Image: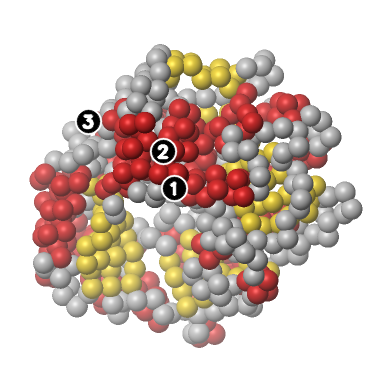
Amino acid sequence: MYVSTSTFQSEHLLFTPGTPTRNALPLIFAFPNTYCVGITSLGYQVVWSILCARSDLQVSRLFTDVYESLPQNPALLGFSLSWELDYANILQMLEDLNIPVRSQCRSDCDPIVFGGGPVLTANPEPFADFFDVILLGDGEELLETFIETCLQVRDADRSTQLLALAQVPGLYVPSLYEVTYQSSTGAIATINPRFPEVPAQVHKQTYRGNTLSASTVVTALAAWESIYMVEVVRSCPEMCRFCLASYLTLPFRTPDVSETLIPQIEKGLTVTNRIGLLGASVTQHPEFDQLLDFFGRPEQDQVRLSLASVRTNTVSVKLANLLSQRDTRSITIAIESGSDRVRQIINKKLNNDEIHQAAANAYQGKLKGLKLYGMVGIPGEEDADVEATIELMLSLKREVPGLRLTLGCSTFVPKAHTPFQWFGVDPRAKKSLKVMQKRLRSQGIDFRPESYNWSVIQALIARGDRRISHLLELTRHFGDSVGSYRRAFKQLHGQIPDLDFYVFEHWPSERVLPWSHLQGPLPQITLEKHLKSAIDYF
């Protein structure tokens, strides 16, 4: 690590930090990646500003490459985890701070190590032994009660602090739950609290307010240089059955455009002319046209506007025209597949005519490119469905030859709290990616497949239980490669289930899942109904 004061001096703060009192609780808030990546995370920005605005906390930031002046004896150490494979950096940062990697090895002299973010909210179990407390859900809802409880028990011993935190809704203390297994390499048998005061289930906490997040800091050193980000929607009403971003973040929420979004944007425009509109489906905001009209005003001519992925049937000529005038060259839509049958399986309410119309509108609106997101290995998918995706892309190429087409394609990875959590990864996906690459690139279509092998590792972590924490520690020392995981599985043979158990097996719905004691927005019985609806199309 190194300190670079110029890094933080380049920041434009859009909130007022508190002035810490003499007895303020010392807290380190870390992001397990570089400053460039971490400061671009809207979630990290917002949580940091909430913490930093308090006078009863002394907050220092920590990244893998830079850090603010750190307290010698922090009371709290927090991590925001946005990407599964950043776990290795968490373990390294703990070691650098001379804090035991495993929670059971920490003493009263060590800080309470807490974490949050989408990865930990979905399935924290692979990382459970590294954290004292995990915040399940939205920071707006959880942070105040978490900090207030920490302040109340700050002078108590560690076990008393953890027991008090475990009784706060949404705060998960893994060490206070005992997990038993049918065998060392078998499924989970039971997950039970160790004490009667500890809840049998921890419920994800959902912020239901009508004001969503916006950037609290703007800097030229972010991955998206000098961008001000505004969350236009949270969750997604479409509820594709594989989609964690929809199911885990329900319900769908939209701030008022005139009362909330435009004032937020105007605040950002005081420090930058680059605006990013974020959300799983920003164009499905019911007042999105009003937002377009705001950016279409002559006084916004210098604004550079970026949009996250948009719903296909909302790509209008008006939208494309405005984006092209505001320094955006392409637009991104998620199609998942060119097969109607597969889209019915996943509940993707979309047809090929709408995709063709979106391409035509993008071209007519003077955009240069159209980026599409696809997926292979979707449960129930056959070779003919992959062929349908190839044919869709080739027909788009023929019909709109002046539009640069890009297809990014991932492999289906099962995610907790979705109807597809019981499915395993389909190994045929590897071949499908190769077939698509050969057919599409030869026709001038920019095909960008995500690594199949790394998708396998993502699935391992997405469906993992506490036993794989030992494997994660080993791989960190074996090197940053897929082969390191296979080597670690070989070394732990007989002590934990094999790779197939976690990644490729279809699990029965009656199985105790690693996250069965952690309640998401929808109960299991509802997820099972959605699963049955998908299987009806197989």
> Are there few (<14), some (14-19), or many (20+) residues within 10 Å of tag 1?
some
Type of the residue with mark 2: Ile
> Which residue carries the number 1 mark?
85
Q: CA distance from mark 2 to mark 3?
A: 29 Å
Q: Quadrant of the N terminus?
A: bottom right
Foreground pick, 22 / 520? 22
**Hey, which residue is sitting farthest right in the picture?**
22
**Which of the 4 image quadrants contains residue 55?**
bottom right
Q: 333 left or right of 461?
A: left
**Which of the 4 image quadrants contains residue 215?**
bottom right
Foreground pick, 253 / 308? 308
Type of the residue with mark 3: Asp
The numbered dot on residue 536 is 3
- Relative image position of residue 183 (x, y in whole percent): 39, 15
> Which residue carries the number 2 mark?
461
- The local secondary structure at tag 3 comes to loop
| Rendered residue at 34%/68% (across/down) | 331
- Relative image position of residue 451 (x, y in whole percent): 28, 52
Earlier in the chain: of badge 1 and badge 3, it is: 1
- Relative image position of residue 209 (x, y in whole percent): 62, 49
| Rendered residue at 54%/33% (across/down) | 128
Q: Are marks 2 and 3 in contact (CB under 8 Å)?
A: no
Nearest to viewer (mark 1 / mark 3): 1
